[in-house]
Image (cartoon, rainbow, N blue to C red):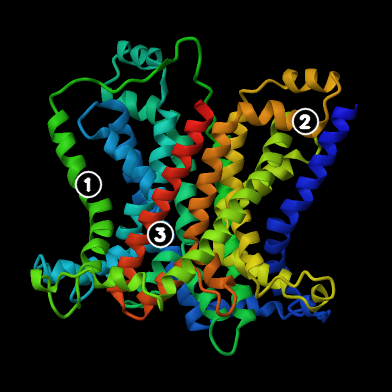
Amino acid sequence: MRLLNSRDRLGWGITIILFLLVLYPLAAVLIQVLLPGVFSGVWKLGDWSLLLEIFNRPLWQKSLENSLLLGLGTTLLATTLGTALAVIRSSWSFPTAKLLDGAVWLLIITPSFILAQGWVLFAAGGGIASELLGWSWVRGAIFQPAGLIFVMTLSKFPFAYLSVYAAMEWKVDGLSHAARLCGASAMTVWRTIQAPLLLPAVLAGASLVFMDTIGDFGLPASIAAVYKFPTLPYSIYSAIYTSPIRFDMAGVLSFYLVVLIGLAMMLQFYMLRRSRFDFLSGGAVRSKPSADGRFAFLLGLLNILFLLIIIGIPVGANIIISLLGTQGGGYALANLTLEHYRELFSSSSQLLTGFGHSLIIAVSAALLGLLVGLGVAYVLTYSKFKFKRLIEVSSILTLAVPGVVLGIGYIFVWNQKWLESIGLLLYGTPWILVLAAIAGAVPVITRLMVGAMAKVPVQLLTAAQLQGDSFIGRIRFILIPLIRGALLSAGLAAFGSGIFDLAVNSILFPPKFLTLPVTINKAFENLDFGYASAATIASSGIVILIILAVELLLRRKEVA
């Protein structure tokens, strides 16, 4: 009974924490639309007709149209591309296949604004494509809706790829063999048996692509310097950082953004229930790519060309531009310089200050997020807490909800006058960035922790409790040593994601408290491409080295 009570107390504590970090800010966005003055102490029913103004105000309507066009177009193309690549990767063995897997993960963890900046530097007028390669047509091809969908597709297809690739880990050849014995062709077998079995994974991947695309802030923020393409996330940001501040506009656009993402999640759950196939049985075997070498060389070559596009262009463009003295000087050897890198580390550089601030925020969020994620995973794995499903949904919600919406909610929640009397007026302080970073890190940490805890039987904890060990003692001396590797991976993942979160940082950064992503993005907006590219390459390299050094040190200590 004492064990159950301790778990219930933990469950209630985690519920309250997730409510403050996630549910309350998101609810505040919707409440602000219905009761616009409630967070200022004014109880007055809002003008609900304002929700319909999105169809009358040109900027609001255009933002909605662009987001839908970008989201639907990217979902269609990225899901098709990701599914095709996953099928090829699972079916045939070819050289450089591991490089494709690595590139997929690199695209997932790389902030979208960095990838978008690389494409802008490549395709813009006077950019690499036109000046170095002589491809003047690239600018017109990229800076249009279809081109932006193409760029977004190349950065979002990993969600569909991983979803389908994971679903193809096991196969039941008996079904296909039976169909072939009945006279079905290979195409018929694929269309009637294999494709329907993959449908849930394809739909799951498509929903992830749509939600991540429609809430993406990085691409519109990066292309704003050279091409005007307002979307819901960027217009929400503009409403907060223009004079006068338009909380009504931010609230309405956030409402529609949340509704679109909610509809996508509901559609996914509905389709998955309608398309459930339990096909794993005693006849299931782990799938292995075919060793047929007839097309291996061709697939390997095509894969290299594909990687040069999806990784080489955005990363390579940043490297090249960071080494140019001036844009007008052309791509000659005489124009190559390290001056931008020297400028980064000068005493007057804003990058060092912003990088220091981001390091503090990321480290704080990683450590505190580990505590929250550990508690969430414990409740989900071992507890019979009656609101466990609410905790599970809340812990993954920030994966789907855009950072700009979460940031708007934090403004409404933590910018109330009565909080000042109790010392909790966090808006305008770095602590609000830490809270937002924790909210963003909890889903990743929780998923890693749940997977690790699933391997630790509850009987170990129960036996320790029967011997008189305390709840904290069981966690400290039994559970943590057994999942230490997962804890390290979760902490480093949270640290890396917290460093480069542009959306939340752009919405919530306090006055005169610049952070790394804001510093890079401001340099890019000011058309200081050389400095912005050098800052991107240098900061990314430093963060990677920090992660590798910490992992090497702690992993070696763990082995010793």
Q: Give, as a three-letter code, the residue at label 1.
A: Phe
Labels 1 and 2 touching (C-beta < 8 A) = no
Along the horizontal axis of the image, is 142 left or right of 468?
A: left
Seen in the picture, residue 75 relative to 335 is either above or below; the reply is above
Please report the residue visible at 62 percent of the width from the left and 34 percent of the height from the top.
450
Please report the residue visible at 9 percent of the width from the left and 69 percent of the height from the top.
333
Sequence-earlier tag: 1 or 2: 1
Mark pair 1, 3: CA separation: 19 Å
Question: Taking the image as drawn, is residue 317 in sight?
Answer: yes
- Give the number of the disc on residue 473: 2
Residue to which mark 1 is pinned: 306
Seen in the picture, residue 70 relative to 398 is either above or below; the reply is below
Q: Give, as a three-letter code, the residue at label 3.
A: Ser
> Residue 185 location, x and y as percent?
26, 21
- Seen from the viewer's position, the closer of residues 118 and 538 is 538
- Give the number of the disc on residue 112: 3
Along the horizontal axis of the image, is 221 left or right of 534?
A: right
